[in-house]
Image (cartoon, rainbow, N blue to C red):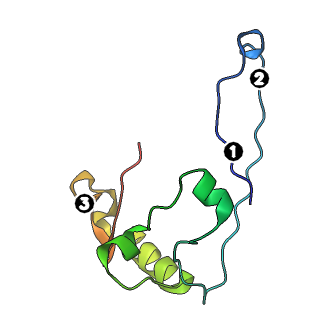
Amino acid sequence: MFLHRVTIPRPDHQHLDRLGLLYFSRPHNDVHLATIKDLPVLQCEGLTQLNEFEASGNPVPTMKEWTFAKQKWQWTKGYHDPKLKTAVILPGFTEKPYA
């Protein structure tokens, strides 16, 4: 695992176009979405915070449970209603609006 921070290019490179390549991977359905603890590289970066499920004391879902709950929420009529953008998707996780 590599952790990279986004930084502003140095002044003499700020006028140049940049290309970023992002790769996303989806865990298998039976993987529990728990925080990886005791990983030295994360501890060095100060990333030791529990995820929302663990912090709230709720059960940590599997990838399958999370995917089905999120998709079900996205298919509801209220999904596009700004007042409902902070609905609880699963116990312990509240939808976050990103603009």
Residue drawn 41% across and 42% down? 99
Tell me residue 30's x, y (percent): 60, 90
From the viewer's perspective, is 87 left or right of 75?
Answer: left
Please name the residue that numbered disc 1 is placed on: 4
| Residue highlighted by disc 3 | 84
Task: Tell me residue 55's x, y (percent).
Answer: 35, 71
Q: Nearer the viewer, residue 21 or 35?
A: 35
User: Which sits in the foreground, 94 or 41?
Assistant: 41
- Mark closer to the observer (2, 1): 1
On screen, residue 70 versus residue 83, left or right, reads right
Residue type at mark 1 is: His
Residue 22 position (above or below residue 37): above
Query: Do the residues under discs 2 and 3 have CB atoms within 8 angstroms?
Result: no
**Tag nearer the camera, 3 or 1:** 1
Q: Secondary structure at mark 1?
A: loop
The amino acid type of the residue labelled 3 equals Leu
Q: CA distance from mark 2 to mark 3?
A: 38 Å
Quadrant in the picture for residue 32: bottom right
Mark closest to the chain's N terminus, 2 or 1: 1
Q: Quadrant of the N terminus?
A: bottom right
- Give percent across and percent down for residue 20: 75, 40
